[in-house]
Amino acid sequence: MSKIGFCVYHNPGHRLTMKTNEIVISPTGIRRTLRRYKPTSAIAEYVWNGFDAGASEVRIDWQPNDLGGIDRITVEDDGSGIDYHELESKFKPFYDTRKAADPANRRYGLSSVHGKNGYGRLTFFCFAEKAVWTTTYGSDGSNRQYSITIHEQSLHRYEADDPVSVQHSTGTRVDFIGCRGLYGDNIARELEHHLSLEFAWFLELSSPIQRRIVIGDRPLNYNSLIDDRDSCRKQIGQTEFDVRYIQWTQKLHDEYSRYYFINSRNIDVANQCTTLNQKGDGFYHSVYVQSNLFDRIPPITGTVSDEIPDQLPLDFEDKSDKETYRELQEFLHKFLSHKRKPFLRTKARTYTEGLKQKQILPAFGENPWDEMRRDALLKVVEELYVLEPAIFASLSEKQTRTLVGLLHLIMDSDERDSLFSILDQVVHMDSDQREELARLLRKTELSNIVSTIRLIEDRFVALSEIKQMVTEPTYYADEVTHLQCFVEQHYWMFGEQYHLVAAAEADFEQTLRNYLYILRGEQKKATLDHPDRKKQMDIFAVRWLHNTDTIDNIVVELKHPSITLGEKQLAQVKRYMNTILDIPQFNATNMQWEFYLVGKNYDRYIEQEIESCKPHGERHLVHKVGRYKVYVMTWSEVWTTIELRHKFLLDKLKLRREELLTDKNSADDVLMSLTQNTAAAAYASES
């Protein structure tokens, strides 16, 4: 067993006398008050006792037995020891305050002295039969040593022998004898984890002495708890402040993040909670601020309330010092906010990714418009998370779905500004935050509009190109290599939100495999026993409407402009339909099928078929059986339908874009906007 530098001294010629005294509480009261302690949290109390006594090093060691358990644990420090004349005041009182004695509710007060509540020395009963303190203290220019013993069965009573003179240095060793429930394979790992959470912030404090904890033969290493470190120097007037910042990966046992104020003698004179506690974001941090400004305040002692304490201004007498301290608080708040923002941004992205994976977002199609709407919604959720993560911290999945759905409705309406009145009732936003959110809402709306305008304009370009291929003989457009290839890439002409299942050269077996993969994720090989299984469709696409649980399918058969559509071409499409009718996997009760025959013109037979289907009230319909419909359209009818569908939307969007751009009234406004333009920023960085 390792020792720090003092030993137990016994003079055979000196008869030891034993002092017995009782602690002011019953054994039952002690057990009830300390029932929440575990072995690791109990050992932590003895480590605190060592540091409270001014120790620079506390060692923890143990003695294993042959069965893999632990017989004895020792906590040893090089502090000032326990003065025999103060023994009664230190060991006799015991404050029966169960809430204060619960390790989950510890508050470490406004100084770094912790062992004030009188209960730490009795926590050994949760893992040992007996505790023996061997302590050496200084008295009248010499050092003296004595022992104190408390048994588990009589926690209300301690025994102490008389002090004797010794030559070695001061300190205290506590031996816990008759240990139970502790195992050699686990003790080092459990202690390192618990003591790291308990002492990491404390070991980072500047101090006149360098403190450390040694477990077995290894110094405590808590680097895994540190997510970020930084430091800076701030000058306010004539006063300099050295600021050290640590971000922790998880909550420490002192559950509040704090500022620690340290004077020029490396003594921490006070600490305060930062303004970024209880935000629901996991941003745990400690900030150490050292300056000679804190030489002019006395150390603050005492405990804080069980609720989060108010921000207590330090008691400066000089008016100039008070103003310096006020500016320091403003700087520290901005410093922490600057550190927190990228942290929240990363958390926000993780949160929105989770929304997508859990399918909490409203139903969106997979066409470019819906993708833009979804991205805009995710950006707003992300920005709200950065603004106030507590909004999302305690929501159930159902509540999250409701909130995100309401945001989606607001984003899709003309009531985006109403979001501010809603948020004002939930969170506090300063002017910068309000402007940032307003800018985001304008930016996402304008971005969506500009992207949609570009998408529609590109579609008009595509439309003009296929017109040229169909109408201009000099283009020499081929049915398969040109027209089919074009429509494969632009099958939006027949409807939005579709997945392309198959195009030319894919037979029915290959098509079925693709179909099952898109709908169910199945990758098994599909085989068909059908005479037409090797037939090939030009275009086959599918969409699944989750809100109605229906699966819409379209099949498009394209014909060269030189071919006049008639009975032969329609019979080919109906044969496709009948083949699909014969394949069970294509005929679930929630499936709808539409077949399109497209060419430059059609004959009288097709005209008569269209006329016979007029009672169904659908243009271009030539055949209808249950959930199966066949349409015949000329290329010009396809183009006209698309132009009518897009032109109204394009005109409306261009008007809305002009409205959103009216906030720039001068060249200065334009130049100012360039600071937010990513292209301009990239150019500036390159130059």
Image: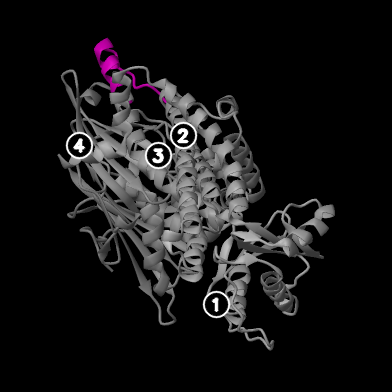
Compute the Cα span from label 2 to label 3.
40 Å
Q: Residues within 10 Å of mark 4 (few under 14, many from 20)?
A: few
The image shows residue 573 at horizontal and vertical percentages of: 68, 71
Residue that numbered label 3 is attached to: 257
Q: Residue at x 22, y 25 (%)?
A: 295
Q: Is residue 566 left or right of residue 412?
A: right
Label 1 sits on a secondary structure element that is loop
The image shows residue 165 at horizontal and vertical percentages of: 22, 52
The mark lying in front, picked from 1 and 2, is 1
CB under 8 Å between discs 4 and 2:
no
Figure check: 238 above or below 73: above
Q: Is residue 128 left or right of residue 202?
A: right
Compute the Cα span from label 1 to label 4.
51 Å
Residues drawn in magenta: 311-329
Label annotation for residue 684: 4
Q: Amino acid at mark 4?
A: Ala
Q: Residue at x 38, y 51 (%)?
A: 249
Q: Amino acid at mark 3?
A: Ser
Q: Earlier in the sequence, mark 4 or mark 2?
A: 2
Compute the Cα span from label 4 to label 3.
39 Å
Q: How many marks?
A: 4
Residue that numbered label 1 is attached to: 506
Label 4 sits on a secondary structure element that is helix
Q: Residues within 10 Å of mark 2 (few under 14, many from 20)?
A: some
Label 2 sits on a secondary structure element that is helix
**Quadrant hosting residue 590:** bottom right
Q: Amino acid at mark 2?
A: Leu
Quadrant of the frame with the N terminus: bottom left
Residue that numbered label 2 is attached to: 446
Q: Amino acid at mark 1?
A: Ala
